[in-house]
Amino acid sequence: MNAPHLNRTLVLEGVVRTPDGAGGFSEAWIALGTLWAEVQPGSGSDVLGEERMLSAVPYRVLVRGTPVGAVSRPKAGQRFRENARLFLIQAVTERDQDGRYLTCFVREEVPK
């Protein structure tokens, strides 16, 4: 297995929910750290969003492995940010049995 070419910096973000005082909550994304990554594109498709069509493109993002429970370890429900681009993390798995690298299955949704 070849080592990935970690040539892009992505900001790992997690969502924080805070009460809004009216029985609901508001969501805000906060930066959890910056990771070097290799981004591999998949094939695209169109999906129906809440109000409009979205062009959804799957990617595989490879990053260095980190211990389970570490804040810097990506997990489903978080996202990567690269400038204005957002990659929603759907699943994370270890790439090798030693856990040196993680494969993150992500989806970038682009409004049409």
Image (cartoon, rainbow, N blue to C red):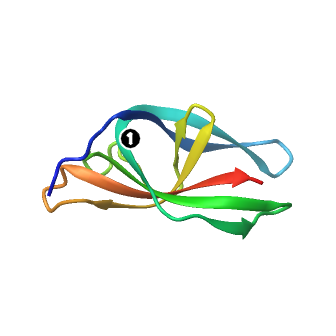
In this rendered view, identify the residue nearer to me: 25 or 55.
Answer: 55
Q: Quadrant of the C terminus?
A: bottom right
Confirm whether residue 39 shows in the render: yes
Residue 92 position in % (x across, y down): 38, 59
Residue drawn at (53%, 43%) of the image: 14
* Residue type, numbered disc 1: Val
Residue 70 place in picture, x, y as percent: 32, 43
40 relative position to 14: left or right: left
Query: For the point 24% across and 50% down, which residue is it?
Result: 101
Count of numbered badges drawn on the protein: 1
Q: Residues within 10 Å of mark 1 (few under 14, many from 20)?
A: few
Do we see residue 76 in this rendering?
Answer: no
Q: Give residue 95's quadrant in the image.
A: bottom left
Q: Is residue 54 left or right of residue 99?
A: right
Residue at image mark 1? 71
At horizontal 16% and vertical 52% (from top left) the residue drawn is 2
Picture coordinates of residue 82, whole percent (x, y): 53, 35
**Residue at point 82% right, 52% down?**
23
